[in-house]
Image (tube, coloured by chain):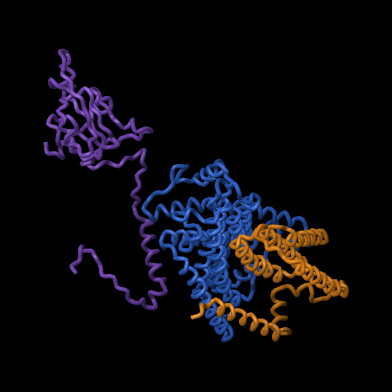
Chain colours: A orange, B purple, C blue
Amino acid sequence: MREYIFYFLALVSVISALMVVFSRNPIHSVLYLVVCFFSIAGHYLLLNAQFLAVVHVIIYAGAIMVLFLFVIMLLNLNKESEPHKPIIIKFASVISASLLVLVLIAAMVNINPAADSHPTLHTIGMVRELGDTLFKEYLLPFEISSVLFLTAMVGVVLISKKES
Amino acid sequence: MQALTKRSKLVSNKKLSFIEKLYLPAILGGLKITLQHFFKKKVTLKYPEVKREFAPVYRGMHVLKRDEAGRENCTACGLCAVACPAEAITMEAAERMDGEEGLYREEKYAAKYEINMLRCIYCGLCEEACPKDAIYLTDRIVDSEYTREGFIYGKDILVEKVDDRIDITKRKKKKGE
Amino acid sequence: MIAYSILDRDWSFLTDKLILVGILFAVALGIAAYSTLAERKIAAFMQDRIGPDRAGFFGILQPIADGVKSILKEEIIPGRAHKFLFILAPCIFMTVALMTYAIIPWGKDLIINGRKFSLQLADLNVGILYSFAIVSLGVYGIMIGGWASNNKFSLLGAVRASTQMISYELAMGLSLIPIVMMSSSLSLRDITEAQSYWHGMHWNIMLQPLSFIIFFTCALAECNRTPFDLAETESELIGGYHTEYSSMKLALFLFGEYVNIFVSAAVISILFLGGYNFPYMNEMGLSPNWVSILSMGALFAKIFFIIFVFMWIRWTIPRFRYDQLMKLGWQIFIPLCIVNILITGLLITLKIYH
């Protein structure tokens, strides 16, 4: 039964991801992206990574996509106002996207499916194990990334302050 | 400057103290007041079953009175129309014919008597002006209508029925009669 | 999570849960329906009135009358509205409001015929985070509804409502961290169990009063209740995001709000008022099943009290201005929460708590 759920979720995520790109209405794109995030959260659940799934929903679906929606709704983008892009940009985007796909394929080729049998993998998604790993093994990267976030926050405050 | 009323208060824009800035004591005080009201006696009357009594000085729809024998008091003197500040009253006089003594008290009577209830301001000056004890304001309420024409009340509505007298003792008592 | 655990268990587990889902659904909607009556009654009583009392004794049938009225009303979909999203929005709002019920522990386990019957749909080990995820999804119903109406005032209302919700989510989350630190778990059942000491009176409200006040205020803001009901302002701003809605779709929005109130009252009771714990629950010498039933009653009593306080506050405190609202959320609550986290951390390190 778990395989069926996986296939269903995979189908939903692939289709919605494609719809993000192909739909003409930006609001639809955003909503498809939300659906895509949900199906990915479902994948996390299937891998028993509950913390990751919930945090994924909170941060991406709950916060970031809401901000996207805000901006798009308030700017009132629609088909008519879409700027016509020069052909060079189209070429460049196609090439860079293909390169990205190439990189992804190259990365996927070396994945070893047998890693699923790793003993700690089934519990790594739980909060306690995640906290242990983050604060013991990966303490330095964790702290560095938090400094990064702090910098971003200070930057936001600086930008939003009016110059006087 | 002299205060206009005794209740006026000086506004002071003093800085709030720390406790006041928390707003919590003020909020709790407000909650206390609303809770006291929660247990207070309710003032609502269940309307169609229970009706609130009108004040004795209430001025509602007019009535044209008859005397004890059932004869109309009004003589169409026109004093009420003159007194009316809203010019709501019009009337046409007519002479009493032989055989109509049972209908009208005096030799002259109002053949037509109309009050435009949309113009009327229910001031009661017609009542004060009337020398014949004929018009009174009652505690009845003027019904709503769909057209403006419907609000022009004629004698058919204003004159009290012989067998259904309207009690105006409260108004009389107020006037000291 | 739910899907995962069902896959690995037997069918009786599934039927248990399905029965519980059915009961919860009925109870949730019933309580939400009667909250509307309670709201009107409490409003009336605080204003020295009687309130609705014509439909049945004491107005008992009023919610049914309201529901019938909503269903029978004409349904209007604005001409250039996005029809699909317009219909989807209230459904999302309602569904999201009901989803939090899954993780609330309603009482201790019942044991029927030697089989354990849990009064909780799913004991997630990330329970609180799940409830936050759900709360953050509530914004979508409002945003989509406001946008799909094709009315700029609806859109503005939606923006107002969702900025408020997003802003207060932060303070809400931060105010909970001390609780999580003290009970060292994210599961709502563990948090409840952690409050069962001191004869069932080890409630978090006594140890974390500041957290409680902040969380309570944020819950008011999340539910769009007075004094933070700028999103709706029924009286002066022709509604907000639901201006263009009519009939049952409007009713779903309004009803969803009462469901939200019930859920937040439940979460507040669990996090701060000891959940299903009541004083001397283990010393009374009752059989475990009786204790379970009484504990459920205790939880519901707490929930009803919190709902009453919500309504009490609504008829007491005037509305905030928008800039005051944002200032309170961002400049007062968030720093207070961070200070509270630091103090709690200090106290836990010094072993004063625990």
Q: Write the residue at 53% across / 75% down.
A: C334
Quadrant of the drawing holding the N terminus of chain B: bottom left
In the rendered image of this protein, does residue A32 appear above or below residue B124?
below
The answer to whether residue C252 is seen in the rendering is: yes
In the rendered image of this protein, does residue C197 appear above or below residue B67?
below
Q: Write the residue at 48% across / 72% down.
A: C327
Left or right: C213 in relation to B121: right
Quadrant of the drawing holding the C terminus of chain B: top left
The answer to whether residue C24 is seen in the rendering is: no
Q: Nearer the viewer, residue C204 or C215?
A: C215
Q: Position of residue C271 (x, y in %)?
A: 57, 69
Left or right: B105 in relation to A13: left
**Given the current orientation, which residue lies at the most extreme top position?**
B99
In the rendered image of this protein, does residue C7 appear above or below residue C214?
above
Left or right: C11 in relation to C84: right
Q: Position of residue C213 (x, y in %)?
A: 49, 71
Q: Nearer the viewer, residue C67 or C297?
A: C67
Quarter of the rendering containing residue A81:
bottom right
Q: Write the residue at 61% across / 70% down.
A: C193
Q: How many marks?
A: 0
Q: Position of residue C43 (x, y in %)?
A: 42, 54
Quarter of the rendering containing residue A103:
bottom right
Q: Nearer the viewer, residue C286 or C300?
A: C300
Q: Nearer the viewer, residue C98 or C196?
A: C98
